[in-house]
Structures are given as structure tokens and as C-alpha cells.
Image (cartoon, helix red, strand yellow):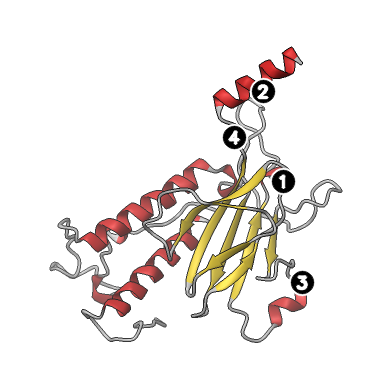
Amino acid sequence: NLSFNCGHEGPTSDSQVRALREKQKRNLIISLFVSQGVPMVRSGDELSHSQLGNNNAYCQDNSINWLNWDLTSEKRDFLDFLCRAIELKQGNPVLQKRDFFSGRPVHGSDIKDISWHEPTGKEMLHESWAKHGLKCLGMYLAAEALEEVDENGSPIIGRTLFIMMNAQQERISFKLPPTKSGEHWESTLDSARPQQKNVNSFQGGGSYPLEGESTAVLQLSVIDFPKKLLTKLVFAGKEG
């Protein structure tokens, strides 16, 4: 029952306290949906139904248990964010592994199915976990190491993910893992930027502005040429 009231006990009109509480809810949702296994969402969680802090309300036949379908703008925004987290989970096989991670290079290559990174971009070593005050880290999930097939024996293709978590209050410039030529990182979910709908691109080896007390998810993407430009390049190659 450890909990943090974000600066005020109980309901409040303080905008900063309310904003932090909403962000912490988004942090929890991201951490749940980037975990392996089936996400366990209790009915009402998606509606910000808190049971007023009562974690054993099975016998309450009142507003503590009743679901309120009259959503405020805050609750609608949270529901929309949760839906985007579900889309991420359902659309990426990397988050639906059938086996446990090994954390070791696959078949003699230098690719690990999972690795952990410091904000400096360096991969965390065993002693890194014992650092006092460690409050920020990144998790790299490599699609190349998935090595799973569907019911027809065809390879299951996913997208590499990089998840950054910052539990301290200050913003951190998190150095991103390097990418190959033609690849870049795309912002997918950021608990500090819930309304962001446009996809922002970041170069491998560059920095991501990870806000304090926030979580962000990036997906590795291949740069797509516009169809008209690609057609021109093909014909230009034939004519040349």
C-alpha cells in the first residue's frame, strides 16, 4: 500500500498536482503495456476509476464501485492514451514473445534480444545496477532477435523498440542507440506529451528530451521514399 499523493492528500484543484497525477497514470499504463504477457486491466481503470483508494471494495454497492461513464476531458484524454498503448501492444510482436528474454547475443551475433542503457547511451553493466540514486534507464528490445514463426512457418516480423524511463524530476537528454543507414527512431508514446499525435523522428546516436517523471517509447523505422519520388528514381536508373 505504498503510495504518493503528488503533493496533496485527496481531491484537489491544484493544476500541478492534477497534471502530475495524470502523468503518473500514463507512466503506469506504458510500463504495463510494454511488459511481456497479457496486460491485466481492471474494469474501470480505463475510465480513471480509482475506488477512492479502496483496494478491497468488493462489498461496496455505492459510488466507490460504480463506474461513472460521464467522462471529464481529463478522463477522455487518458482513455485515448490507453487506446494508443493497446494499439502498440497489439501491433508489435516484440511485445508478444512466447519465450523469456535471455539478454545474450543471438546465434553468435552482437544482437541481444533485450539490453539496458544508461542516459549516456552506454549499455548498463552489472555494477551499473548498484549505482546509488539510479533513476533513469532505457530498455532496448531488438526485433532481429525475435526468431519466431507463425502457424504457417513464416517469420514473425516486429519493430525494434527503445523505452526510456525517468523517475527523477529533472529533464534528461537521453542518448539514443545508433541506427543503420536509412533508419530512424519514431516517437510513439510519451507520458509527458500525451496529446502529441504527429510522429517525430530522431536520428540514431542523437538525444531525446526525456522529461522528468516520465516514460517514452520509440520505434525503429525505415525511411520511406515518397511513391512519386521512388518512381522517378527507378525510371532515372533505367534511362541512365
Which residue carries the number 2 mark? 233
Between disc 1 and disc 4, the foreground one is 4
Mark sitting earlier along the chain (3/2): 3
Q: In screen coordinates, is 40 left or right of 121?
A: left
- Above-or-below relation of 209 to 98: below
Query: For the residue carrying disc 1, how many other residues have a C-alpha within 10 Å: few (<14), some (14-19), or many (20+)?
Result: some
User: In the image shown, does 111 or 208 lie closer to the viewer?
Assistant: 208
Marks 1/2: CA–CA distance: 33 Å
Figure quadrant of residue 151: top right
Q: Residue at x 67, y 15 (%)?
A: 235
Q: Tags 3 and 2 in contact by the CB under 8 Å rule?
A: no
Vertical arrangement, residue 171 with respect to residue 228, above or below:
below
Residue displayed at 17% across by 56% down: 69
87 lies above or below 136: above
Three-letter amino acid code of the residue under disc 1 = Ala
SS type, badge 2: helix
Q: Earlier in the sequence, mark 1 or mark 4?
A: 1
Measure how far apart labels 4 and 2 are at the Cα level. 13 Å
The residue under label 3 is 125
Residue at the spot of label 1: 145
